[in-house]
Image (cartoon, rainbow, N blue to C red):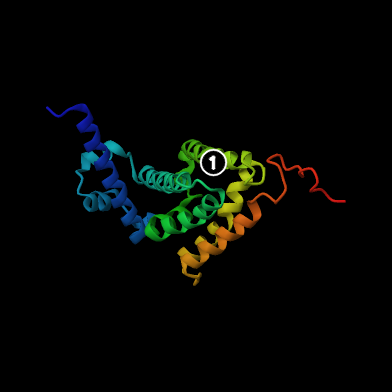
Amino acid sequence: MPEPGRRQARSALRRQQIIQAALACLAEHGLSQTTMETIQRRSGASNGTIYHFFKGKEQLAAAVYLEGIVDYQSYLVAELERCREARDGVLSVPRSHLRWVHEHFEWARFLFQARHAQFMATSETSMAEQNSAFAGSIARWFARHVEKGSLKRLPPDLYISFLLGPCQEFTRLWVSGWARTPLGTASEAFGEAAWQALRAEEGQTPQGQKLEGKGEE
């Protein structure tokens, strides 16, 4: 008889396969033309298995969305945590964002298209919890470098806005086929702009006060 841990791992793998199959179907046919039967055939799961995990197409579509957000945010936080220096970390966020978008194009497009879809209504609590955890991870990393005097002290939500606001708008254009700037060029430009906006000014303490002798006459 399989061990509980092995059964859980198999179950998690099967769930992931269904989510990936659903993503492919949604990208190819759209929500209205995608059926549970289509996803079931694409995933290779039995009818009983797919309904064991998901009650219907809308719940599965919401799971695809949430799984994408978790994958995206986990990747950005992991890349940020690798960075020891403030500038490296700031530059890593736009770079990681656009790299994830490039490597997960269908997922990225779905995330932009489906955020306010009706099927997301039942997932707002899960979304809020996930976004809160993500924002907290970003804020903690920035707090360390604010205390070192490398970054400006700002409200935590402004850091994410500076880091990802321009990237999000560019990504919206890119997944729609309107943007032509190479992603590498865009990530460098956005990263440098964010660094110029967020780096502490020379001669300031972590609290944002001028050092003695550095104030205006």
Task: Determine whether, in the image, residue 41 is placed left or right of residue 89.
Answer: left
Residue at 54 percent across and 58 percent down: it is 167
Q: Secondary structure at mark 1?
A: helix
Task: Determine whether, in the image, residue 212 is placed left or right of residue 48.
Answer: right
Q: Which quarter of the rendered picture does the N terminus lie within?
A: top left
74 to 34, vertically: above or below: above
- Say which quarter of the image contains residue 109: bottom left
Q: Position of residue 183 (x, y in %)?
A: 47, 65
How many numbered marks does the figure carry?
Answer: 1
Whether residue 107 is visible to the viewer of this picture, yes or no, is yes
Residue at 20 percent across and 32 percent down: it is 6
State the residue lying farthest toward the bottom. Answer: 180
Q: Which residue is mark 1?
A: 141
How dense is the environment of label 1, judged by Cα within 10 Å: few (below 14), some, or many (20 and up)? some
1 to 38, vertically: above or below: above
Q: Position of residue 14 (x, y in %)?
A: 24, 42
Q: Position of residue 209 (x, y in %)?
A: 76, 42
Towards the viewer: 20 or 35: 20
Whether residue 176 is visible to the viewer of this picture, yes or no, is no
Task: Determine whether, in the image, residue 32 is placed left or right of residue 85.
Answer: left
State the residue lying farthest toward the right. Answer: 217
**Which residue type does callout 1 highlight?**
Trp
State the residue lying farthest toward the front. Answer: 213
- Say which quarter of the image contains residue 141: top right
Towards the viewer: 44 or 6: 6
- Say which quarter of the image contains residue 196: bottom right
Q: Position of residue 52 (x, y in %)?
A: 26, 36
Towards the viewer: 98 or 114: 98
